[in-house]
Amino acid sequence: MTLSLTLAAAWAVLANVLAMLPSRDNHWRRAYMLIAIGVPILGYVTYENGPWIGLLVLLAGMSLLRWPVIYAARWIGRTFGGRTP
């Protein structure tokens, strides 16, 4: 297993451990921290293992951080969807 995949697996374990700890802000600060750490790891995985493995790691990260993805999709839909409020 390459170093980049090891880092991605460690990131996933960290995300799961952080999700188990109680939080007053519904884990949003931790999610921002995980996103900031995860994006360079995702780039490294894609660089070292190719785009298909990078896509799989991206999907795994999106499944762990699903609420930021859902809120981003809603914001994009409101902003660029063409509906008038």
Image (cartoon, rainbow, N blue to C red):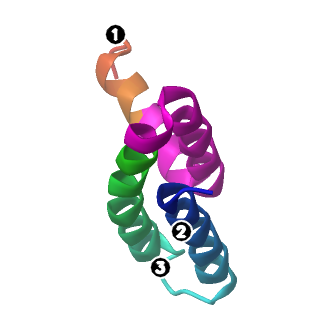
Q: Residue 19 in the image: state x and y as whole percent.
A: 64, 76
Label 2: which residue?
A: 11
Which residue lies at the image location 58% right of the left edge and 45% below the top edge?
57
The answer to whether mark 3 and mark 2 are in CB contact below 8 A is: no
In space, the residues marked 3 and 1 are separated at their CA atoms by: 32 Å
The answer to whether mark 2 and mark 1 are in CB contact below 8 A is: no
Q: Residue 61 in the image: state x and y as whole percent.
A: 57, 51
Going by the numbered disc 1, the residue's amino acid type is: Gly
State the quadrant of the C terminus: top left
Q: Main secondary structure of the magenta part?
A: helix
Label 3: which residue?
A: 25
Which residue lies at the image location 48% right of the left edge and 32% below the top edge?
50
In magenta, the rendered stretch is: 46-74
Q: Nearer the viewer, mark 3 or mark 2?
A: 2
Mark 2 or mark 1: whose residue is earlier in sequence: 2
Going by the numbered disc 2, the residue's amino acid type is: Trp
**How many C-alpha atoms fall within 10 Å of the one at disc 2: few (<14), some, or many (≥20)?**
some
Residue 24 or residue 32, whichever sits in front? 32
The answer to whether mark 3 and mark 1 are in CB contact below 8 A is: no
Label 1: which residue?
A: 82
Query: Please, is residue 7 above or below residue 48 in the view?
Result: below
